Amino acid sequence: MIYASIEEFAAALPPNRAIAGLDLGTHTIGVALSDLRRQVATPIEVIRREKFTLDAKRLLALLEARGAAGVVLGLPLNMDGSSGPRAQSTQAFARNLEKLTGLPICYWDERLSTVAAERALLEADTSRKRRKEVIDQVAAGYILQGALDRMAHLGRSEP
């Protein structure tokens, strides 16, 4: 099921299971995974996109192998907050993925996540070749970490 808010998504998750973060690009899917306590996001893999059925099969196998309980999908909104062709493509991917899995899915605003990932990799003095190889999974880590931080904040503000 696709949840409209991070609050509803968090409420639907079983306890003590990791969640995945995805950075969906035109050629790749960056994948990150949280720890079981959902405090730290770790970039884990880049899936080279071929066609949806193959991409979904590889992704779902990875999520099952890692015991993921939900998926946070980066939503590439325009800087003014409007939804463009990339956001619509991401939403179509989520709708198609929803038909193949019972995992809860939620969107997370990914504006500037790739910029932040690029900056972090530059600060770590990562070579241009290596940056190209890992940028999408690092961006997925930024997306997931933002969602994890928000969910942690939700947990602290409950009575």
Image (spheres, rainbow, N blue to C red):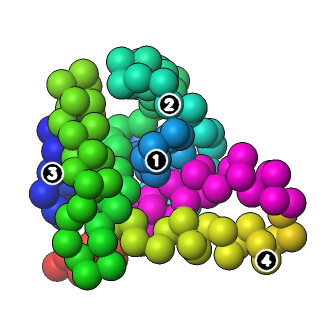
The image's mark for residue 49 is 2
Of residue 27 and residue 121, the one placed in the foreground of this image is 27
| 48 lies above or below 14 | above
Of residue 57 and residue 88, the one placed in the foreground of this image is 88
Q: Which residue is mark 1?
A: 25
Few, some or many residues within 10 Å of mark 3 (<14, 14–19, 20+): some
Q: Are marks 2 and 1 in contact (CB under 8 Å)?
A: yes
* Number of numbered discs on residues: 4
* Cα separation between marks 2 and 4: 28 Å
Name the residue rendered at 74%, 67% in the picture: 121
Q: Earlier in the sequence, mark 1 or mark 4?
A: 1
* Cα separation between marks 2 and 3: 25 Å
Q: Which residue is mark 3?
A: 3
Instruction: Inspect this view and state whether residue 123 appears.
Output: yes
Q: Are marks 3 and 1 in contact (CB under 8 Å)?
A: no
**Quadrant placement of the C terminus:** bottom left
Query: Is 96 inside the magenta-drawn segment?
Result: no
* Cα separation between marks 1 and 4: 23 Å
- Looking at the rendering, the stretch of residues picked out in magenta corresponds to 127-148
Q: Position of residue 91 (x, y in %)?
A: 22, 47
